[in-house]
Amino acid sequence: MTPKVFFSPVITPEKVLELYKALEVRLPGKVALKVHSGEPGNQNFLRPDFWKPVIDAVGGTVVECNTAYKGGRDVAERHMDTFRKHGWLDHFPVDLLDAQGPDLELAIPQGKVIQKNYVGKDIANYDSMLVLSHFKGHPMGGYGGALKQLSIGVASAFGKKYIHGAGDPTNPWKSDPDRFKDAMADAAKSVVDFFEGRILYINVMKNMSVDCDCCAVAEDPCIKDIGILASTDPVAIDQACLDLVYACDDPGKSHLIQRIESRNGVRTVEAAAALGLGSRQYQLVEV
């Protein structure tokens, strides 16, 4: 059955909640709310007040993992200070999944590049997950969306190096670019399998720079805001975002498309679909 991707060109906190409700799926038990806390200095990340209505409605705990590079989010103490400065702790409980080791190792028997994924051990405290993603460009992945949040986003600091290095954590930034994207797809599958499909996805196409929210110095957005998407399928929602970028009439899209294509960003979607993680065919339903 072709998955549905719900879409609205209206971008408000209330519309995020409306699209979540359109999925008509209740996340069971203790819910992990995966966000991007925003690197200090970044101007484009989505603030906690934007996500507040949907997070309040779902309940649960905001979760993140530490970064693999030096900055304001690389160790738990600095990362929590960043959460505090960015206002997250004013609204929500926050859990850094890899604040304390050891990491939880997830097996990926079907993995094309990696056969194991290292995630923060506290993920075992949750029964389901809502993945809240800011769709935009990315310096290495070409774009960032639901699949990146599932893979790099849920991986521990060590796990991020392992994925970036395509299985070699000693060489995280110089691995083959396509193997890195295949490894992201592998890692994403391990998280979906861990939750046995009890995951929902919301992508917001707003403040779309060619750079990620992990960049302290990021380019300003190059393309007009497009909308909000929600789905039960991480492949379909990312493919729909890519299709909307190509279809829009903003001339600034060429800069974002150049970033996506120069990094072969669609490779992550292709690899995830090949693993059976979702479908590149979808039904776009406007709300």
Image (cartoon, rainbow, N blue to C red):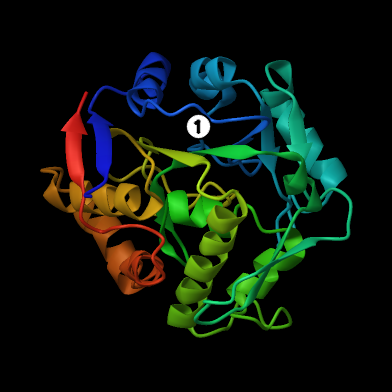
Q: In the rendered picture of this protein, how many numbered marks are placed on residues?
A: 1
- In the image, residue 259 above or below residue 200: below
Mark 1 neighbour class, 10 Å CA radius: few under 14, some 14 to 19, many 20 or more: some
Q: Quadrant of residue 287?
A: top left
Q: Quadrant of residue 108?
A: bottom right
- Please tell me which residue is depicted at 66% across the width and 65% down the height of the picture: 160
Q: Nearest the camera: 50 or 40?
A: 50
Q: Secondary structure at mark 1?
A: loop
- Please tell me which residue is depicted at 70% across the width and 39% down the height of the picture: 126
- In the image, residue 47 above or below residue 249: above
Q: Report if residue 193 is visible in the image.
A: yes
Q: Position of residue 37 (x, y in %)?
A: 63, 38
Q: Report if residue 252 is visible in the image.
A: no
Q: Position of residue 125 (x, y in %)?
A: 77, 40
Q: Is residue 177 left or right of residue 52?
A: left
- Please tell me which residue is depicted at 32% across the width and 24% down the height of the picture: 22
- Please tell me which residue is depicted at 69% across the width and 21% down the height of the picture: 92
Check disc 1 and report the residue beneath it. Answer: 46
- In the image, residue 162 above or below residue 205: below
Q: Position of residue 226 (x, y in %)?
A: 25, 35
Q: Nearest the camera: 192 or 267?
A: 192
Which amino acid is tagged 1? Leu
